[in-house]
Amino acid sequence: MTSNPCVGGSTAGVAAKALAAGRLLRLSVLTSRLVSNSRWWLVAIVGVGLALRLWGIGWGLPGRTELHPDEHDYVLRYALCLTPAQLDPGFLNYPSFLMYLIAATFRGLSHIGLISGATWEAFLIGRLWSALFATATVLPVFMLARELGGSRRGALLASLWMALLPLSVWEAHVAVTDPLMTFWVAMTLWVSVRLVRTARLYDYLLAGACLGLATGSKYTAALAVIAVVVGAVVSVSRGRSWGQACGGLCAAGAMSILSAYAVAPYSFIRFEDLLSAMAFESHHVAGAHLGFSVPANGWQYHRYLYQVVAAWPFSFGLALYVSVLAGASWVLLTFSRRHLPVLAFAVLFFGVTGSWTFVPLRYSMPLLVVGVLYAGLWQGTLLDSRRRAVRIAGRAIILVTLAYTAVFSVQTTARYANETRMQAANWMDATLPRGGTLALYGWSRYVAIPSRPADYTITGGRDDRLVRRTEAGGLAELIEITSMHRDRHVRHGDVDWMAAYDQLGATNSPLEFVVRFESHFINKRFYERLDPMYAGYFVSPTIEFYRPRHHPVAVTIPPAVPPRFVSIAGM
């Protein structure tokens, strides 16, 4: 019997289509299971975030504990004074929560013999607390995204961006109050949005506890009270009574005071001193700080504008910032009342902190949490779209954002593992003969110092005007310059100082360039145009060495110095 080729071909085609459909179905089921099993994705994201924050966390230790001014002067200095018999830190400009955590851990581990009790170990412990809380912020971001009605995909994406968030990774390497405060602010926002849905007494008490712990971490976190209040008000519009809302807010207020008192008691006990400290800080954030305040020399150096066009692009990284802007536009266009607690906090917090002339990047950390939240939620809507073209575009946007942000976070975090001041110090130890003369220009914290400074004659100083004296030559065998001082003058357009620095290695100068230690990361020159201080923002500044032309000291590059961090003049 002769077979009909037409029928056979049709059967084969149907079978092939059925097989392809089966494969697509299995792939769809697998993808659905992976996405639905968000717990394991969340564990992986937390693991990535923790690894980034622990990488290079011992930078500068044990020898250079003073590299970060706030860590050394305002946290560890007072944490090391705390004992069971002395619980008053003696410093109220910062709340004592982080100081207590560091002191309790340091004293406890020393007592049981797990650490030696050396001072540098307390710095490491403080940084570990920062890293743990910065990593843990991934969890309330996920919960907040879900509470706002985001899909699992959107919530996981928001968590991923929080894990990779460059500024959060950087600040986790320092024992400062902002990572701790940011975690508790994120918790407060999550519970505040829950109030819209539940308005239970338990949630009011939890919101108050989180708000109190946030305020006990850093005083500006008290602004998050607006989220709790707005959450209560919106719950009334959804059927709750005003009496229930007012009672809940009273309970939340009482709990916040108790929680803040538990972790920062002397801010209450010495309330008059606290008011004096707050008056000082109010003047501090409104004052001029060379290299870290606005206005400066450029169109971007104005209050509010600086954060939007300079600080946030660098803090997020360019690719993630684009999604943050898109997410912010999306939430405003698809407005829902459940977003009001978060938006009210963001507006108030930016309104207050953006009005300050002192503009350290870390002051914006709670706002960055809101940014990654809406970036992830917006991207999640693209993946969940019914339109295939939108889903494809969403995947492309996510892949580009992931690739760029991962590279940017890794490269900028490498600055801690390969700190230029430590690299330069090792080079000096191997290069400059004992008894040699070294001129260091800049604040001692911002320059490289030999590990045995007593073996050398060290001159120079913090006053940049001393740089001019090098033009006479013969003052030292090596002259060291740090970008953390030079770029301050560049930022503020100080022509005289910039000219003095530029003359150091000029052809007609009595000095010649020897070696440079600097970090490199993607689009560094672009970020420097936003603000030259970003090139070495409290970590791995560019360190340059010069020597007199008529009295050259022999210099060599030891193999221990990574070549990508060094450039050297031909000799």
Image (cartoon, grey):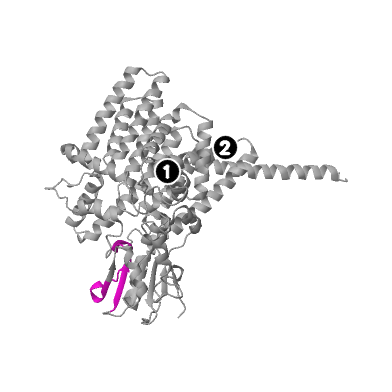
Q: Which mark is residue 368?
A: 1
Classify 388 as above or below 408.
above
Q: Residue furthest right?
A: 2
Circle nearer the viewer, 2 or 1: 1
Which of 482/409 is in front?
482
Secondary structure at badge 2 equals loop
Q: Position of residue 488 (x, y in %)?
A: 38, 57
Q: Would you name the residue on which mark 2 appears? A: 384
Q: Distance between the residues labelled 2 and 1?
A: 24 Å
Which quadrant does the C terminus fall into? bottom left
Q: Which residue lies furthest to the left in this view?
A: 85
Q: What residue type is labelled 1?
A: Leu
Residue, x 49% and y 43% (percent of image)?
157
Residue, x 48% and y 58% (percent of image)?
524
Q: Where is residue 496 in the image (x, y as percent from the top left)?
A: 40, 62
Residue, x 47% and y 39% (percent of image)?
155
The magenta segment is 436-458
Secondary structure at badge 1 equals helix
Q: Which amino acid does label 2 sit on?
A: Asp
Which quadrant does the N terminus fall into? top right
